[in-house]
Image (spheres, rainbow, N blue to C red):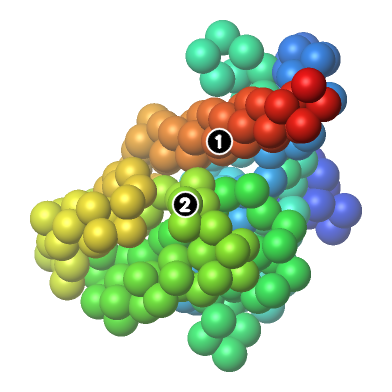
Amino acid sequence: MSSPGSPGDGQGAGSGSTLKPYLRRKKSSLGETKIAVLGMAGVGKSALCVRFLTKRFIGEYDQASENKYKCSTVLEGESVTFELLDTRSQNDDMGARDDVVRWADGFVLVYSVTSRKTFDVLADVRRKVEDMKKASHVPVILVGNKADLAQFRQVTQDEGARLAVDLSCTFMEVSASEDVTKVTDAFHTLCKEIVDYKRRSRTFLDRVFGLKKS
């Protein structure tokens, strides 16, 4: 598959990728935002990633490969640089392997609205992520893909919304094939939450170490 840039080296670029670097001071203090896309095989993880990065929809992907893209996007008038990892589910791990969870700052949990099995596993994936991160709140967004396939739906929108409440995260239903705007909104929402989370964490650490110094 040809990626937004070159899939072999994992270097991709979103639309308008020749953007100014995210404010230099903030970039150096927060580092690059790292997002991992998790979920069972076949839910459309690759389609969502490529739709966001290139605005194009491609229906078929190599299920055996895992791709990492580096790109920039504009968020609230600022350019944000981040890495996006399109994971592969191995042995039903949903892509949530130790190295992936340690690497990522935030996670897109994807299921297909046409498959209840892909939906039912995500609560355990969220718990696994939190256990590995040793944190009660990790930036996550729950995404129900293939919303255009209403005739094959097995998971209602209300069920998705209720699971998001249980997981204390944002929820969106999208269609990678039909609606690039909602796909973009999902990634932007998570990216903003990660940046805000890092800023809060930095402020807390500054306050703690500041008190120790005083």
Kindly state the secondary structure of the residue where label 1 is placed.
helix
Looking at the rendered image, the quarter that the C terminus falls into is: top right
Q: Nearer the viewer, residue 2 or 27?
A: 27
Left or right, residue 76 beside residue 81? left
Q: Nearer the viewer, residue 137 or 88?
A: 137
Above/below status of 26 relative to 151: above
Query: Is residue 46 among the parts visible in the rendering?
Result: no
Say which amino acid is labelled 1.
Tyr
Query: Is residue 196 among the parts visible in the rendering?
Result: yes
Residue at 81% x, 52% y: name it. 10
Say which amino acid is labelled 2.
His
- Sequence order check: which comes first, mark 1 or mark 2? 2
* Residue with the most extreme top position: 77
Residue at 30% x, 47% y: name it. 171
Percent from the top left, x then y, of residue 130? 52, 64
User: How far, Cα to Cα, is label 1 from label 2?
Assistant: 9 Å
Q: Residues within 10 Å of mark 2 (few under 14, many from 20)?
A: some
Percent from the top left, x then y, of residue 44? 46, 62
Q: Residues within 10 Å of mark 1 (few under 14, many from 20)?
A: some
Q: Are marks 1 and 2 in contact (CB under 8 Å)?
A: yes
Percent from the top left, x then y, of residue 136? 47, 57
User: Dot 1 corresponds to which residue?
Assistant: 197
* Residue with the most extreme front position: 214
Q: In the rendered picture of this protein, how many numbered marks are placed on residues?
A: 2
User: Dot 2 corresponds to which residue?
Assistant: 137
Left or right, residue 68 beside residue 134? right
Looking at the rendered image, the quarter that the N terminus falls into is: bottom right
Kindly state the secondary structure of the residue where label 2 is placed.
loop
Image quadrant assignment for residue 127? bottom left
Residue at 74% x, 69% y: name it. 99
Above/below status of 153 relative to 204: below
